Image (cartoon, rainbow, N blue to C red):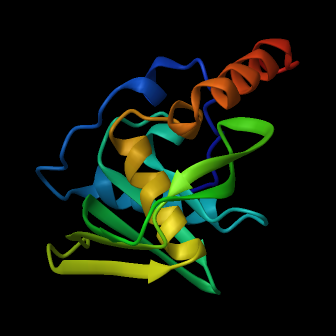
Amino acid sequence: MTAREIRLYGDPVLRTPCAEIETIDDGIRALVQDLLDSVALPGRAGVAAPQIGVGLRAFSYNVDERIGYILNPRLVEVRGEAQPTGEGCLSVPGLWHDALRHPYARVEGIDLDGGKVVLEGEGLMAQMLQHETDHLDGVVYVQRLPKEERAKAMRAIRESDWF
């Protein structure tokens, strides 16, 4: 298993809603290991399967010295008024903008044994849960920016050396 290359904005896999994982097999176990290896690199709070080119509902996280994964996650609860929150994305390198995020979020899914997993939290954990579930729904954070800020972000993307 290995840390996989991150797909960049413009790759169609990032704008496509992901399929549910229906069968947990060796391929899914390998995907989870790749997600865990990919998120363990410095400066990473989360990596969603489409960011490594896989259109399935799974992500890994690395928040507050806690590393893990979740399969078939669904954002089931947010609390508090959405606030502008400084955010970046591995798939949009070099950009940092204020995305609207709720201060609390709760996600439910399963683990590799099919057992229920609940992830919840405030601050960075809440932000990561919302950001990664967005990826699984085919949404990149720049789509969540207010119109004028989104226009600036899109201009910066078009002018970047990676686009």
Please give left or right for residue 22 compared with residue 158 in the image: left
Residue 37: x, y in percent?
60, 63
User: In the rendered view, would you say 9 is above or below 26?
Assistant: above
Residue 68: x, y in percent?
47, 76
State the residue in front, 109 or 30. Answer: 109
Residue 70: x, y in percent?
34, 67
Kindly give the residue lying farthest to the bottom in the view shown.
65
State the residue in front, 99 or 38. Answer: 99
Please give left or right for residue 5 compared with residue 42 in the image: left
The residue at 61%/62% (across/down) is 39
Quadrant in which the C terminus appears: top right
Which quadrant would residue 130 be assigned to in this image? Answer: bottom left
- Can residue 34 be seen in the rendering of this structure? no
The residue at 28%/56% (across/down) is 26
The residue at 47%/29% (across/down) is 14
Which quadrant would residue 114 be assigned to in this image? Answer: bottom left
User: In the rendered view, would you say 91 is above or below 155?
Assistant: below
Residue 140: x, y in percent?
52, 35
User: In the rendered view, would you say 123 is above or below 10?
Assistant: below
Please give left or right for residue 117 compared with residue 100 in the image: left
- Can residue 18 be seen in the rendering of this structure? yes
